[in-house]
Structure formats: structure tokens, C-alpha cells
Image (cartoon, rainbow, N blue to C red):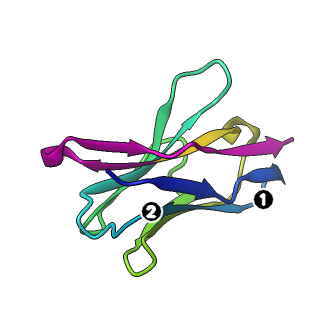
Amino acid sequence: QVQLVESGGGLVQAGGSLRLSCAASRSIVSINVMGWYRQAPGKQRELVAVITRGGSTDYADSVKGRFTISRDHAENTVYLQMNSLKPEDTAVYYCNAKRVAYGMDSWGKGTLVTVSS
């Protein structure tokens, strides 16, 4: 397993930007997929963006063109750059790490993002 700690959340006005960070407790080089998920009040947790070990990315339709996920193996950190934020982006954002072949599915405790209109 790996421990994940998110940071960078906060209150921002609509149209603004935030960068979330997910720091891992060990090397992430061998972790197949790392991703960001979010859960808004009263809603289910949903996928925001994922990035593979090789750098391939995928995004939810709602954030395409606005959010960018990246991973820094030297820093053992995954980032989520969020631009043109909207009130509907308000949620707790969680970092996730998966190594399917090893049954690893680790989650951070989340960081709150609030976008005011």
C-alpha cells in the first residue's frame, strides 16, 4: 500500500484556478494508475482524471479542456491543475493509486475545493 496526502484545496471564485497536489509515501514509479476523484455533497464519488505510469491521461467530460493531471516521479507527487473553475466543481477531491495486479487501491483523505459564483 501507499499513503496519499492531498493538499491545495481552498475557496476560489468562479473562473479562477487551483493546483491540487497528492504526495505519496513512497515511489510512484511502479504504480500503474493514479487519479483524482471528487465527491460533491449528496452525490456519489466520480472520476475526474487519471494518468498511467506511461503518462496516458483520461478525463471526465465535464473537466476536459479545463483540468490537467500530471505525475512527477522524482517528487512522488501527482498534480491536478484546475482552470476556469465553476461552482459545480465544488467537492472534496480525493487522490487514488491503483496497482491492479497487486490488489492495491489506496485513497487519500481528500481536500475540499469550494468555487463561489
Q: What residue is shown with label 1?
A: 16
97 vs 65, nearest the viewer: 97
Residue 111 highlighted magenta (yes or no): yes
| First of labels 1, 2 by sequence position | 1
Q: How far apart in space, not on screen, are marks 1 and 2 (Cα)?
A: 27 Å
Q: Determine whether 74 is above or below 115 in the image.
A: below
Q: What residue is shown with label 2?
A: 24
44 vs 102, nearest the viewer: 102
Task: Name the kind of residue labelled 2 in the image.
Answer: Ala
Q: Which mark is residue 55?
A: none
> Which residue appears at 41% of the width and 51% of the height?
35
- Kindly tell me whether residue 66 is visible in this rendering: no
Q: Which of marks 1 and 2 is in front?
A: 2
Residue 45 position, x and y percent, is 51, 29
> Which residue appears at 40% of the width and 81% of the height?
74
Residue 89 position, x and y percent, is 67, 41
Magenta: main secondary structure equals strand
Mark 2 and mark 1 in contact (Cβ < 8 Å)? no
57 vs 2, nearest the viewer: 2
Residue 115 appears left or right of 78: right
Q: Determine whether 25 is above or below 13 in the image.
A: below
Q: Give the range drawn in magenta.
A: 96-117
Residue at the limit of the structure toward the bottom, as seen here: 74
Residue 76 highlighted magenta (yes or no): no
Asked where in the image residue 91 lies, by quadrant, the reply is: top right
> Which residue appears at 58% of the width and 55% of the height?
6
The C terminus lies in quadrant: top right
Q: Determine whether 79 is above or below 72 in the image.
A: above
Q: Is mark 1 on a helix, strand or loop?
A: loop
Residue 50 position, x and y percent, is 38, 52
Residue at the limit of the structure toward the left, as seen here: 101
Residue 37 appears left or right of 6: left
